[in-house]
Image: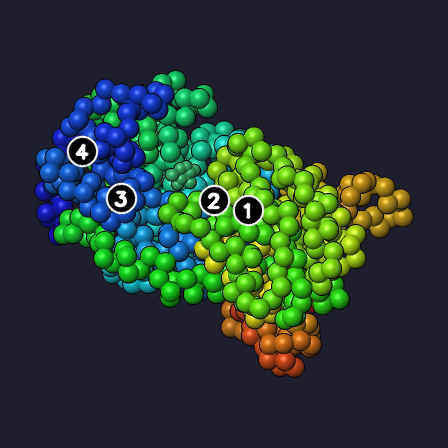
């Protein structure tokens, strides 16, 4: 629609209609299938039918036929024929489900993340979704938090690259040039702004309290990378930032997001988050919440109705509020226009297209390939892996046959391929035996363990050549509001692993989880450890690819694995403290450490093995133009063709603000033939050395280190200076 027509449409709206445009409700409420009274005060039960007909956006409508029907009804009732905008959580794929984002982070492959988002957009847009609440760019350090599975990990640089790649995948590569979200694409929403991942103790929705430097250097960069990639929408977070809930936090939303970083898209609250500011104790009532949200720069209130109920009064009293409401409504209409909804309110929703695309072979093939890249091999003693054809293979544990391997937030997904099915497909003739393979229930259903069939399992698998212990946590115990204090495997799973190891056969631990679990004891006992995460639709096939050696593992941890819960938070890009070790002859006692556990994680960020041994040499830093070239040679020393994830880190040795020991600044995935050697080059600029000095991002002159290698704990080092 041309701008003049959009302006005319805007001018024809009443105040009440503008406020309804700023309100988002689930589709079941709009269509009367669900009752407002059920939501306990966050929604006004006496909203008029005319309000519902003027609501601007909706969430959770799935399927082409249903979304077309809802749109038709809406257009018939809406006095201005303004189409509804359909939003949903399409987090890691739609019907074809990709690995959970944390696993995707472990691929260190931004192109794979872009491709998965593009496929998700193609599928969900055919099913009527026009905007996805993804990517989630919350930096995570605390695996007790269930939502770490939705993030790409603990590193701001990698999270930013991943988030930007996903935005481009969803919105289309042309969006930044044309401003139009074309066919097969959807608008994206960066979330949760800001710092939701820093919830105290990993307890969901809990208080966040960060220094400005920590916020700006670690937590904000990934959201802002998505903003630079043109993301259309940003969602506020449930938590406080500097003791003000993000949803009514004016310095954060209007200040940092819009004014400092030029975000001109739509800001939406999280689900019910504006009403929740009353419980926070930040607003006395809904009226105050509405006022503060509008002033802070919120455009859409999701699943509460403070703005709709009190906005007219506020607009009458205050011209500033009227102006802010007008700006918000213009932004929402502009987003609908970018999606082409005024010309085609269904966008790509089409039953035929839906049938042809959802779970089509090409999408499944991509899901399998990307899942293969997301698997992380953590241990492989005596070449326990890959398995060899002809082996008698035992598979024990709750994930031997489980198809519940999509991971949380796979709202439109169906079953995934189980480990057993994957291995059967790979080696149809192989002798595969399962044991103790009952499903692990969810803590939400009061299930705390699997049935103990350890004696039977040991008897059944005693003569196997190798045993896979397929263990983990229920996928429903990960994701939103799934915080845990105990990250160990359940007791029966731990006992099972111990007894299987005592059989004297090599045991391969295969861990299905949405977070780093505490697996130190089991990892010590087993010959090999494979972190399987929740890999989506093609979980079993992708695992079989790696276990059989068809795919050489290349995943690297995007989040450190703690040795014990007591170490948390444990992350690689930490500061040194004044007492990393004592050099003045005092006893070791007074250094920064635990007395019952090392400081180091069990497995650090960037770590992961391959069936190939790679070696590094010749790191050098050369000045080049305004920046530097960092060169390092990587060689495939032993083993098959494989991909090495070459990582570049920097350290600013002394500065006006204490700097982390390591900060990731480059990644290159290099495929090498046996014996092949390649020089890998990275470019560093002054921006890569910059940090928040209290007023701005700037680099300071002095000494730096460049570090390169295949894991954050095993790097070559070379000095350079600015
Ligand atoms: C609440 C979650 O925090 C958010 O991530 C999600 O997008 C919304 N609900 C909508 O489902």
Image quarter of residue 111: bottom left
Observer-side mark, 4 or 2, equals 2
Q: Residue 70: x percent and y percent?
A: 20, 40
Q: Marks 4 and 2, Cα distance to the nearest angstrom?
A: 33 Å
Q: Marks 4 and 3, Cα distance to the nearest angstrom?
A: 14 Å
Taking the image as shown, residue 224 lies to the left or right of residue 348, namely right
Mark nearer the N terminus (1 vs 3)? 3
Taking the image as shown, residue 11 lies to the left or right of residue 33, namely left
Front in this rendered view, residue 447 or 336: 447
Label 3 CA crowd tier, 10 Å (few <14, some 14–19, many 20+): many
Q: Marks 1 and 3, Cα distance to the nearest angstrom?
A: 28 Å
> Disc 2 designates what residue?
408
Label 2 CA crowd tier, 10 Å (few <14, some 14–19, many 20+): many
SS of the residue under disc 1: loop
> Disc 4 designates what residue?
54
Taking the image as shown, residue 283 lies to the left or right of residue 398, namely left
> Disc 1 designates what residue?
514
Observer-side mark, 1 or 3, equals 1
Q: Is ligand 1 less than 8 Å from the beta carbon at label 2?
A: no
Mark nearer the N terminus (4 vs 3)? 4
Mark 1 touches mark 2? (CB < 8 Å): yes
Mark nearer the N terminus (1 vs 2)? 2
> Disc 3 designates what residue?
86
Label 4 CA crowd tier, 10 Å (few <14, some 14–19, many 20+): many
Q: Residue at x 67, y 64 (%)?
A: 392
Mark 2 touches mark 3? (CB < 8 Å): no
Front in this rendered view, residue 294 or 196: 196
């Amino acid at each position: 629609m041309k701008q003049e027509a959009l302006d005319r449409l805007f001018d024809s709206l009443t105040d009440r209609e503008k406020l309804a445009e700023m309100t988002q409700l689930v589709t079941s409420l709009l269509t009367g299938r669900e009752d407002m009274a059920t939501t306990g005060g966050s929604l006004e039960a006496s909203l008029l039918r005319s309000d519902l007909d003027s609501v601007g956006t909706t969430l959770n409508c799935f399927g082409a036929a249903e979304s077309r029907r809802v749109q038709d009804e809406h257009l018939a009732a809406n006095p201005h024929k303004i189409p509804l905008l359909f939003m949903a959580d399409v987090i890691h794929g739609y019907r074809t489900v990709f690995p959970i984002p944390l696993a995707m982070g472990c691929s260190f492959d931004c192109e794979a993340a872009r491709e998965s988002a593009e496929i998700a957009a193609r599928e969900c847009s055919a099913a009527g979704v026009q905007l996805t609440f993804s990517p989630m760019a919350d930096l995570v350090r605390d695996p007790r938090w269930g939502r770490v599975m939705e993030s790409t990990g603990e590193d701001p640089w990698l999270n930013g690259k991943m988030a930007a790649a996903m935005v481009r995948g969803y919105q289309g590569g042309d969006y930044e040039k044309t401003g139009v979200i074309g066919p097969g694409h959807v608008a994206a929403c960066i979330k949760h702004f800001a710092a939701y991942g820093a919830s105290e103790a990993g307890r969901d929705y809990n208080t966040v309290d960060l220094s400005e430097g920590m916020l700006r250097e670690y937590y904000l960069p990934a959201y802002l990378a998505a903003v630079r990639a043109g993301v259309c929408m940003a969602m506020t977070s449930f938590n406080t930032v500097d003791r003000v809930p993000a949803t009514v936090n004016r310095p954060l939303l209007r200040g940092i997001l819009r004014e400092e970083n030029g975000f001109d898209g739509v800001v939406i609250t999280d689900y019910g988050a504006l009403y929740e500011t009353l419980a926070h104790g930040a607003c006395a009532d809904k009226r105050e919440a509405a006022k503060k949200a509008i002033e802070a720069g919120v455009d859409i209130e999701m699943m509460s109705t403070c703005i709709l109920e009190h906005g007219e009064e506020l607009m009458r009293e205050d011209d500033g509020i009227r102006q802010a409401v007008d700006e918000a409504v213009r932004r929402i209409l502009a987003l609908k226009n970018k999606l082409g909804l005024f010309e085609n309110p269904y966008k790509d929703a089409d039953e035929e297209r839906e049938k042809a695309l959802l779970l089509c072979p090409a999408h499944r093939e991509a899901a399998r390939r990307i899942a293969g890249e997301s698997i992380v091999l953590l241990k492989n003693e005596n070449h326990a892996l890959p398995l060899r054809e002809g082996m008698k293979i035992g598979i024990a544990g709750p994930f031997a046959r489980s198809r519940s391997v999509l991971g949380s937030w796979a709202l439109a997904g169906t079953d995934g391929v189980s480990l057993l099915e994957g291995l059967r497909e790979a080696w149809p003739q192989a002798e595969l035996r399962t044991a103790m393979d009952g499903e692990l229930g969810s803590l939400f259903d009061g299930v705390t363990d699997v049935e103990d069939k350890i004696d039977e399992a040991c008897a059944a698998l005693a003569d196997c050549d190798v045993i896979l212990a397929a263990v983990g946590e229920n996928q429903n115990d990960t994701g939103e509001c799934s915080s845990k204090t105990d990250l160990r495997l359940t007791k029966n799973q731990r006992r099972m692993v111990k007894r299987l190891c005592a059989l004297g056969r090599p045991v391969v631990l295969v861990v299905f989880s949405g977070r780093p679990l505490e697996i130190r004891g089991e990892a010590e006992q087993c010959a090999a450890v494979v972190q399987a995460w929740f890999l989506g639709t093609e979980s079993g096939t992708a695992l079989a690819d790696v276990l059989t050696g068809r795919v050489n593992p290349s995943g690297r941890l995007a989040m450190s694995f703690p040795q014990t819960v007591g170490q948390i938070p444990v992350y690689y890009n930490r500061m040194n403290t004044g007492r990393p070790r004592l050099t003045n002859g005092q006893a070791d006692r007074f250094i920064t450490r635990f007395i019952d556990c090392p400081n180091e994680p069990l497995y650090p960020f960037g770590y992961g093995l391959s069936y190939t041994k790679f070696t590094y040499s010749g790191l050098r830093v050369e000045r080049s133009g305004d920046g530097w070239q960092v060169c390092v040679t990587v060689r495939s020393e032993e083993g098959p063709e494989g991909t090495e994830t070459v990582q570049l880190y920097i350290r600013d040795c002394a500065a006006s603000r204490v700097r982390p020991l390591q900060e990731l600044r480059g990644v290159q995935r290099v495929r090498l033939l046996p014996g092949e050697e390649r020089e890998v080059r990275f470019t560093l600029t002054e921006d890569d050395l910059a940090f928040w000095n209290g007023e701005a991002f700037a680099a300071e002159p002095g000494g730096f280190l460049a570090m390169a290698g295949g894991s954050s704990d095993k790097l070559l080092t070379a000095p350079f200076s600015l």
